[in-house]
Amino acid sequence: WDILAVILLTFAVITMLALLHWTNGNLVTPLRNFLFRWLGYGSYAVVLVFIALAIWVFRRRLFGKKIFPLSRILLIEMAYFAFLGFVSISGGTQLSRAEAGLDGGIVGWGIAELALRFVPVQIASLVFVLLIALGISYGSGLITWLGNIIDRQIATYVAKYGDQVNSSDVI
């Protein structure tokens, strides 16, 4: 498993160097062009995916098999594609910019064009921002984590001041 994690990290580093135009080569340059053309600025997230996979493989060896719900993966993907659409709308939803590897690339342009067929730009932008926020907060587990913290705080408060609260004080 360690070899797989090292390969994933190596691929992430090489891809990041290619995306930053710090290296060129027969394999790296076409990869960079492909990622920029199709994903635009979202191509940097590919590096994050490889780093996350490498960490997951390392953790699997250390802590055993952990279950990562499919629903969280789908929510993160929803946020990612909403980001591509939002960036494309922010850039003016032009195919020429998408083909040049700008904004959300061709994928983001397609998502933005589809959304703009049904709603105006302002509403589509707002929907994309909401999808990004919800996808990241629920997909990363941030909402669950914050909920647990609030539950502990409430339990501590009730344990400390619970007898002092009258039922007539509660609305």
Image (cartoon, helix red, strand yellow):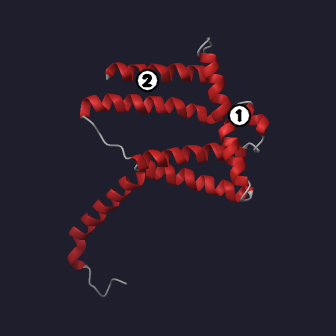
Say whether residue 128 is left or right of residue 152. Answer: right
Q: Residues within 10 Å of mark 1 (few under 14, many from 20)?
A: many
Residue that numbered label 1 is attached to:
102
Q: Nearer the viewer, residue 14 or 106?
A: 106
Q: Nearer the viewer, residue 153 or 59?
A: 59
Say whether residue 63 is left or right of residue 134. Answer: left
Instruction: State the CA–CA distance, disc 1 to disc 2.
Output: 26 Å
Looking at marks 1 and 2 on the same chain, the residue that comes earlier in the sequence is marked by 2
Q: Give the x, y percent position of residue 20.
A: 61, 23
Residue that numbered label 2 is attached to:
8
Mark 1 residue type: Leu
Mark 2 residue type: Leu
Say whether residue 161 is left or right of residue 144. Answer: left
- Residue found 69% across the figure and 43% down from its top: 110
Q: Is residue 20 visible?
A: no
Please tell me whether residue 56 is drawn above or below residue 170 in the rendered image.
above
Please tell me whether residue 18 is drawn above or below residue 149 in the rendered image.
above
Based on the displayed image, in which of its 4 quarters is residue 103 positioned? top right
